Amino acid sequence: MKAGNLLKLLALMADEIIVGVFIFLILPEIGVEIPLWAGLLVMSLLLAKDFLIAPFVLGGGADKKPRAGPEGLIGRTALVVEDLSPEGVVKLDGELWKAECLDGVAERGERVRIISVRGTKVLVERRG
């Protein structure tokens, strides 16, 4: 495991460590007895929560490379604003792109899927 992931895991488990110290060490010192089963139940629930969210925390975040540039467009859906016969214009996230329809003609108002990028032109196919 990378050092960065180990630190993330420790940060994720901080609540278990704090609650465990509080339930099993601090409360008994001040005269508050929590049944062992109740303390273990609380710890189990906190650990279960960590197992559910750990893949999201350890599998992404700052280490994950953002999808930017052409590869970030592939697979997205665009709206045809100028008929693609086969070339025209599509709109994606408020931006206009030159486009070429690879499987026939796409008319204005139709939605198309971006399958590739060639320079400043997106290559699209009709959604079917």
Image: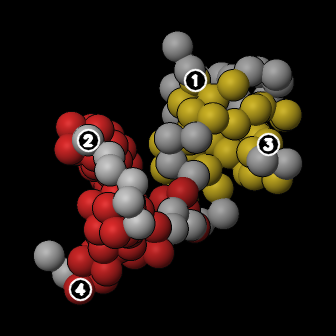
Q: Residue at x 24, y 77 (%)?
A: 6
Query: Which of label 2 and label 4 is nearer to you?
Result: 2
Front residue (pair 64, 4):
4
Vertical arrangement, residue 100 with respect to residue 80, above or below: below
How would you rate the neighbour count of disc 4 (Cα within 10 Å): few for under 14, some for 14-19, many for 20 or more? few
Helix or strand or loop: what does disc 1 sit on? Answer: strand
Front residue (pair 28, 50):
28
Please give left or right for residue 8 compared with residue 71 in the image. Answer: left
Closer to the N terminus: mark 3 or mark 1? 3
Q: Residue 33: x and y, percent?
A: 32, 50
Q: Residue furthest left?
A: 1
Vertical arrangement, residue 98 with respect to residue 61, above or below: above
Amino acid type at circle 3 is: Lys
Q: Is residue 59 visible?
A: no
Q: Residue 28: x and y, percent?
A: 32, 61
Helix or strand or loop: what does disc 3 sit on? Answer: strand
How would you rate the neighbour count of disc 3 (Cα within 10 Å): few for under 14, some for 14-19, many for 20 or more? some
Amino acid type at circle 2 is: Pro
Disc 4 designates what residue?
3
Helix or strand or loop: what does disc 4 sit on? Answer: helix
Query: Which of label 2 and label 1 is nearer to you?
Result: 2
Vertical arrangement, residue 38 with respect to residue 85, above or below: below
Disc 3 designates what residue?
91
Closer to the N terminus: mark 1 or mark 4? 4
Amino acid type at circle 4 is: Ala
Q: Residue at x 21, y 37 (%)?
A: 37
In the rendered structure, are the residues bearing label 1 and label 4 in contact, judged by CB atoms less than 8 Å apart? no
Q: CA distance from mark 2 to mark 3?
A: 62 Å
Q: Residue at x 14, y 76 (%)?
A: 1
Disc 2 designates what residue?
35
Q: Residue 74: x and y, percent?
A: 51, 48
Give the number of the disc on residue 126.
Answer: 1
